[in-house]
């Protein structure tokens, strides 16, 4: 086999690589070679490499934003990126929001977040994760503080949780709020913001293969191939996992997204997708189903976009459908 080193996000670096990969495929027809060959022949993957995006998924989010304007550079946005690894959506969010905007990525696998993005490794299906997300957006974590933590510890893991739960830091969200919205610092408005501290939730989760969770090291999980976050190919399984994760994202939106906030959620279609869409419709005034051009034709993924979260939502009604 040729000694090809794969860049940390699975995309080859050298100009000779297309040729080397073809040769490698001839010598070694294992699944990794086939995977690399498919990656290299994909125009979006090449474009991602040129634009320094960590994966081709970036283009799906840029298409969504170009059409539905979910990002706003002239405002401070608090963005939650669910299933952020390897980080392409977070990169797009960072690029398309103002400098002061906060972006938090959550992923069950370890992954160094892109510059200017904070991250926690946590399972979105756990209630504790919701609490950590709320704490991040409502407590004392200005971006510079987070950056300092990144520098010292590389990644925020459990240590971040410790820091967050036991910190005596007195800097509160109230102070952050009044510094970023000096004209609207009334107590009432602050309370509303504290209750629902997120402006936009983007969710691109797909259940990782069990192997990824066993090889739980950065070496494996930063490499797109070893991360094994591809679909299983078994439609029923993909769909079922997807519905569970989408529901978790929707619950997060119910609990943490501010009224009028927006929601983007990848879903693998199947028997229950209409029901999920119905649940999204109960939470948002406008719901759109969208398949970006950059989504592979053979993929069963579709994006459900909820715009303008309703003010008063009857949670019981939502969960009994
Ligand atoms: C398709 S990838 C996301 C790609 C990402 N949006 C990007 O642009 O780079 C799906 C991610 O969802 C994560 N994920 C799956 N189940 C999860 C869970 N229960 N909690 C948190 N993250 C999860 C996986 O680990 C995987 O990294």
Image (cartoon, rainbow, N blue to C red):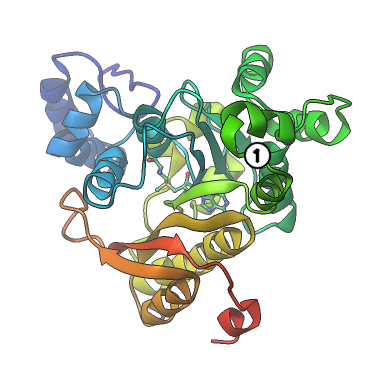
**Mark 1: few/some/many CA within 10 Å (<14, 14-19, 20+):** many
Q: Residue at x 22, y 46 (%)?
A: 63
**Which is more toward the observer, 141 or 37?**
141
The answer to whether residue 57 shows anywhere in this view is yes
Q: Is residue 11 left or right of residue 203?
A: left
Residue 292: image location, x then y, percent? 21, 54
Nearest the viewer among 2 and 73 is: 73
Whole-percent x, y for residue 132 in the image: 71, 44
Residue of label 1: 137
Q: Is residue 124 placed above or below 159 in the rendered structure? A: below
For residue 147, side relative to residue 187 (left or right): left
Q: Is residue 206 visible?
A: no
What's the residue at 44%, 56% (across, down)? 263
Badge count = 1
The front one of 40 and 215 is: 40
User: Height in image: 240 above or below 122?
Assistant: below
Q: Is residue 96 left or right of residue 309?
A: left
Mark 1 lies on a secondary structure that is helix
Q: Nearer the viewer, residue 21 or 266?
A: 266
Horizontal relation, residue 43 to residue 86: left or right: left
State the quadrant of the N terminus: top left
User: Ligand 1 within 8 A of label 1's CB?
Assistant: no
Image x and y of residue 153, in percent: 68, 17
Q: Residue at x 35, y 34 (%)?
A: 92
Q: Residue at x 46, y 53 (%)?
A: 205
Image location (x, y in percent) of residue 45: 21, 35
281 in relation to 306, above or below? below
Q: Quadrant of residue 311?
A: bottom right
């Amino acid at each position: 086999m040729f000694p090809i080193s794969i860049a940390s996000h699975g995309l080859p670096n050298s100009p000779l690589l297309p040729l080397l990969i073809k040769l490698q495929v001839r010598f070694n027809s294992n699944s990794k070679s086939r995977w690399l060959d498919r990656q290299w022949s994909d125009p979006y993957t090449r474009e991602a490499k040129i634009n320094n995006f960590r994966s081709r998924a970036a283009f799906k989010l840029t298409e969504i934003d170009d059409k539905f304007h979910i990002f706003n550079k002239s405002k401070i946005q608090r963005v939650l990126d669910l299933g952020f690894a390897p980080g392409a959506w977070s990169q797009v969010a960072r690029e398309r929001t103002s400098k002061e905007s906060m972006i938090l990525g959550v992923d069950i696998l370890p992954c160094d977040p892109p510059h200017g993005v904070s991250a926690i490794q946590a399972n979105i299906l756990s209630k504790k994760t919701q609490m950590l997300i709320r704490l991040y957006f409502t407590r004392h974590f200005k971006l510079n503080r987070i950056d300092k933590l990144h520098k010292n510890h590389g990644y925020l893991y459990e240590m971040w949780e410790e820091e967050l739960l036991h910190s005596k830091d007195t800097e509160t969200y109230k102070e952050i709020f009044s510094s970023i919205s000096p004209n609207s610092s009334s107590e009432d408005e602050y309370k509303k913001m504290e209750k629902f501290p997120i402006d936009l939730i983007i969710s691109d989760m797909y259940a990782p293969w069990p192997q990824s969770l066993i090889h739980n090291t950065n070496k494996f999980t930063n490499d797109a191939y070893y991360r094994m976050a591809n679909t299983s190919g078994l439609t029923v399984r993909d769909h079922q996992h997807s519905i569970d994760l989408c529901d978790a994202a929707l619950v997060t939106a119910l609990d943490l997204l501010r009224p009028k906030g927006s929601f983007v959620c990848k879903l693998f279609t199947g028997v229950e997708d209409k029901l999920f869409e119905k649940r999204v419709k109960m939470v948002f005034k406008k719901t759109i189903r969208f398949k970006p051009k950059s989504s592979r034709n053979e993929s069963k993924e579709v994006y459900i976009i909820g715009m303008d979260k309703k003010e008063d939502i009857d949670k019981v009604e939502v969960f009994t459908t």
